[in-house]
Image (tube, helix red, strand yellow):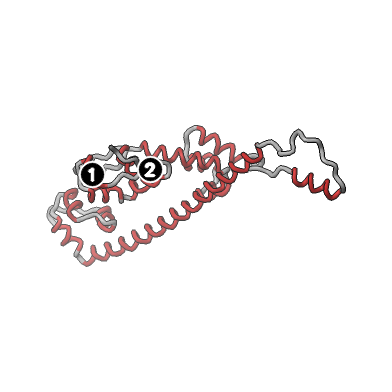
Amino acid sequence: MRRLVPDEQLVRRRAAGETLRGLGREYGVAHTTLGRYFARPQVARELREARRRAREERRASAAQAAAERRLEREVRRRAKTQAALERELARPAPEAGRAPRVRRSRYAEWLDERDARRPLTRADLRSGGDDLAERAVAAGGGMEAVLEATGLRTRENVLRVIDPAILVRAFANDAAAEGARTPERERLRRLLPDPELLQRRAAGESLRRLAAEYRVSHTTLGRYFARPQVARQLRALARRSPPARTRT
């Protein structure tokens, strides 16, 4: 090799799916030079091993993300159930202001007392961890801030232990932070993404409409939105974005 100076990132990036032409531009060589380099027996073995590790990492990451999404859906469901119960308990009792009924037996009296018993709400079971999480979320923090404030070590612990109503607000803070983050622009030639691009795509606008406005092909946008970091931003924004309206 006269011009190619490979480093440890070269094989990893190729294993991750980057094209020979894209890598060739960054390393200052032709894509055919890279093709011959990756065809060397030792490099080919390294590339196969790197691809195997990359597949395992993607599967593990996907499994973890799926588990967290399931827990998040469960948290949102519990938060809705909790809010409905609190609204129900806030209503006045149907017999308030009426004259007391004449009870015919001790058993009937016991039934009345049992029916009037107020169930415990999540607010009655509030813990010190909930207070710490509440302060972190009130300061604009998301799940990472809650994790750090409570010391619960993993996101799964946070999702299982902390008040769901607090966690829903933490999800909203995370989504807002994702929407305000500068979009990834590494290795882009013509596309100049901005926060509005991600917000419009999350709201459901088509690739072709967006591509026409950003002066790129819809396939370029498709590849951009498929990047892992961009896909995570889109998922976070889609959870809080209203459906796109048809423009006139």
Can I make out residue 127 in this image? Answer: no
Q: Residues within 10 Å of mark 1 (few under 14, many from 20)?
A: some
Which residue has dot 1 on it? 211
Where does the image place residue 122, in percent across and percent down from the top left? Answer: 63, 42
Quadrant of the snapshot with the N terminus: bottom left
| Left or right side of 147 for 211 | left
- At a point 22% along the width and 40% down the height, the residue shown is 214
Relative to 62, 153 lies left or right? right
- The residue located at (40%, 37%) in the rendering is 177
**Which quadrant is the C terminus positioned in?**
top left
The residue at 68%/43% (across/down) is 120
Which residue corresponds to mark 2?
243
Check contact, mark 1 vs mark 2: CB within 8 A: no
Residue at image x 18%, y 60%?
37
Query: Type of residue at label 1?
Result: Ala
Sequence-wise, which precedes: disc 1 or disc 2? 1
Is residue 96 at all visible to an observer of this figure?
yes
The residue type indicated by label 2 comes to Pro
Which quadrant of the structure image shows residue 56?
bottom left
User: Residue 47 versus residue 155: which sits nearer the camera?
Assistant: 155
Q: Secondary structure at mark 2?
A: loop
User: Which one is nearer the viewer's eye here, 147 or 11?
Assistant: 147
For mark 1, give the secondary structure. helix
- Residue 43 position within the rendered picture, expressed as x and y whole percent measured from the top left: 23, 63
Of badges 1 and 2, nearer the viewer stands: 2
Q: Decide if residue 182 is on the left or right side of residue 169.
A: left
Disc 1 versus disc 2: distance between alpha carbons? 19 Å
